[in-house]
Amino acid sequence: MKKVKSGGGWPAIWYTLRKAREMGGVWKLWKAMRTKNACKTCALGMGGQKGGMVNEIGGFPEVCKKSLQAMAADMQGGIQPEFWSTYSLAQLRKFSPRELEACGRLVQPVLLRAGEDYYEPISWEAAYAKIVGKLRATSADDTFWYFSGRSSNEAGFLLQLFARLYGTNNVNNCSYYCHQASGVGLQSSIGTGTATLILDDVEHADLVFVIGGNPASNHPRLMTTLRHVRNRGGKVVVINTIRETGLVNFRVPSSPWSLLFGTPIASTYIQPHVGGDLALLTGIAKRVDEMGAQHEQFLAEHCAGGEAWLAHLRATPWEELVVKSGVSRAEIDDLAEQYAAAKNVVFSWTMGITHHIHGVKSVQAIANLALMRGMVGRPQAGLMPIRGHSNIQGIGSMGVTPKLKDEIFQRLEANFGLQLPTSKGLDTLACMEDSYAGRLKVGFCLGGNLYGSNPDAAFAEAAFAELDTVVYLNTTLNTGHAYGLAKETIILPVLARDEEPQPTTQESMFNYVRFSDGGPRRHAGPQSEVEVIATIAQGVLENTTPIDWQSMQDTGRIRAAIAQVIPGFEKMATIDETKQEFQIGGRTFHEARFSTPSGRANLHCHELPVLAGLGESELRLMTLRSEGQFNTVVYEDYDLYRGIDRRDVILLHPDDIARLKLTAGERVTVRSEVGEMPNILVTPFESIRPGNAAMYYPEANLLVPRTVDGDSKTPAFKCVIITVEVPARVPVGAT
Ligand SMILES: Nc1nc2c(c(=O)[nH]1)N[C@H]1C(S)=C(S)[C@@H](COP(=O)(O)OP(=O)(O)OC[C@H]3O[C@@H](n4cnc5c(=O)[nH]c(N)nc54)[C@H](O)[C@@H]3O)O[C@H]1N2
Ligand SMILES: Nc1nc2c(c(=O)[nH]1)N[C@H]1C(S)=C(S)[C@@H](COP(=O)(O)OP(=O)(O)OC[C@H]3O[C@@H](n4cnc5c(=O)[nH]c(N)nc54)[C@H](O)[C@@H]3O)O[C@H]1N2
Ligand SMILES: [Mo]
């Protein structure tokens, strides 16, 4: 397939028109996209009361392929009852992620009984009776509660509250596989775990670092902002192991000029080795110090640990930094000079930073670098983790973590007269480990695809199989429904955000709360997430707690509770009348007063990890997303900007193909310490830094070990040591 020369542009627009035709016309899709609901895909935040396709500072039309794909998926027809008697489990397992998604919307509860080969439709009453009966018969700490990031704040708040009053803190979310390292790292540096700035600040930066992410595919709306930065003469420094086409040049659809001619995005493009960022960031800081370009006064007045950190930098040899980053001294010097010369600098990052065993350290290193020049705690500069799911940040704010923030815990107990459990609670992978060990009995998943997103897919399947019951609340089928099976599996169909009978709220990555109106249901069968949670909670807890669960089906009541309990969400109390969307209090730092106990930001020293996988036949594998997917949901096999038209590939630099004596186009077996994938196509990919390889997630989860960052518990999805073998060349008898 021919590779395009820029991201965005006409292919994205043709795609839109094609999708519109499939969905019954441009007008129908346009109407659906323009309703007052927060956009369903990434957390950049679009829609809400400003109307669909409008960003937080009023930019319009902000369209992206992903939001159209998500909308089109929700506009699909319903899965017919015969489907369930036609396709056995064995057949469902043969479906690809794309085929499962394309089966249509889930419209009735279905049950897979122990030992059966077919799911069977059941009534909502029967499903509720089964779930309530099972939960009542199970001790609370034998259950876990997993949340994805597309559900509303209201559903997130209600379900975590129910799980705790039921008696467990085994409450967690997909962030543990995503940005947890950002939350933990930022918290340790500045006392809060989210972006320190708003979209308008980014618009006015004169230098933006984009580290370890591919926003051209995964956060396309950010490209509009990066274009504005470049147009005003600002710089964009991209640090990415792959030279991503869309970060080199992007055709922003909302600008006629950019659409025709494209806009250069990166002014500088640096390609470190996978996992080399910590050393690179440390190197840039070392050079800034050598130049004497740090902000001494800021370090002295607003930071703690500055001196020790500078001493540590000075003692770290250059050679170590160059070897461990894979970036030359000249390039590091250049980055430091650009940084020292800039006035307003924004640091943004995504999974290339967090999906490592040193994820938290890398986030701290980004914060160190920003703090040393006083780039945090003032307008037009700051720290910006580019968040994943559209409401993953809100789900975190609502208390969906094993440990509640002290303030939330105290307010819940004081304001509502509740008694909450104080047990430790398990993070996401710990729940899977405990399931595998036979210690847990019931899993409850609000959205997402915990099986598909998990490292070590064979382990994940076995972990689910140990459970008695797993309950999934989903909108469409995914691989979890075919492989993430307990002895008894129940799928409950829920309404999408824009079909909710009542309003809901979502939080963007800029700490902005959006109010979604909901809208008419597309199918008769699915229920609202809040209704499902309240009904189960009422059945299990009845009147044993001070909460009237039935009345909690009213999302306005949940918002009233959120306003009382969650710090910074006070304006939730009036949002139903005012419809006034708001910035969460205490999160945006336009002044250098940090949320740490001392009010100062902390600088952290790091020992640099050895660059993994330098053995002769080894490669460092990153698992990543294509242009045509949203997480475990694959919409099309085609990865447009990288020019790859299938998913069973390993992307290798031609130098590595030669070094490993492979041939482009041949089938190989890729092995890691936990698994192997046969029949993978060797695919030359000049854009990747030699020594590193790439394969598509979720398929490649068969190869990812359960090695986590000790601080954030996030698996190292971006650094799997692999070897590649041509089957015919494996000597007879070898394993
Ligand atoms: N279209 C689309 N949009 C999405 C999603 C989706 O699946 N599809 N998912 C959403 C979610 S939940 C998330 S978390 C985000 C994910 O957004 P991204 O983080 O952009 O997604 P990944 O595909 O994981 O991207 C990894 C990028 O990091 C680079 N990389 C990998 N390892 C390293 C490294 O060690 N160092 C450096 N410097 N770079 C590295 C890769 O080359 C690649 O460009 O996107 C959100 N938006
Ligand atoms: N190897 C590897 N593994 C990874 C990653 C990687 O880069 N590499 N990335 C990780 C990351 S960043 C993340 S965030 C996780 C993603 O993990 P998850 O969030 O668990 O997975 P998704 O694929 O986003 O979930 C998709 C499902 O959500 C359901 N859904 C969609 N809309 C709604 C809704 O409104 N309500 C409800 N209840 N359900 C809905 C649909 O049924 C769909 O099948 O995966 C992680 N795993
Ligand atoms: Mo994510």
Image: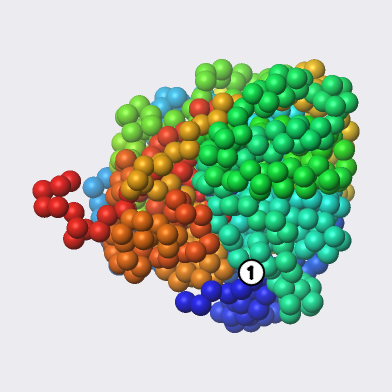
Above or below for 199 versus 249: above
Percent position (x, y) of residue 127?
A: 43, 47
Under mark 1, the amino acid is Gly
Q: Residue at 31%, 59% (x, y): give it.
A: 661
In the shown orientation, is residue 687 left or right of residue 652?
Answer: right
- Looking at the image, can residue 710 be seen? yes
Q: Residue at 36%, 61% (x, y): give it.
A: 658
Count of marks, rendered view: 1
- Looking at the image, can residue 697 be seen? no
Above or below for 684 versus 240: below
Is ligand 1 within 8 Å of the beta carbon of the residue shown at mark 1? no
Along the viewing direction, whichever of 106 and 652 lies nearer the viewer? 652
Along the viewing direction, whichever of 504 and 288 lies nearer the viewer? 288
Tell me the crowding category of disc 1: few under 14, some 14 to 19, or many 20 or more residues within 10 angstroms, Cα based: many
Above or below for 412 versus 337: above
Q: How is the image coloured?
A: rainbow
Percent position (x, y) of residue 370?
A: 76, 37
Percent position (x, y) of residue 588?
A: 82, 38
Along the viewing direction, whichever of 471 and 587 lies nearer the viewer? 587
Residue at which label 1 appears: 7
* Badge 1 element: strand
In the shown orientation, is residue 402 left or right of residue 295?
Answer: left
Above or below for 173 versus 225: above
Q: Residue at 34%, 38% (x, y): give it.
A: 463
Residue 49 quadrant: bottom right
Percent position (x, y) of residue 550?
A: 62, 39
Q: Residue at 65%, 79% (x, y): give it.
A: 10
> Hey, which residue is sitting farthest left in the picture?
733
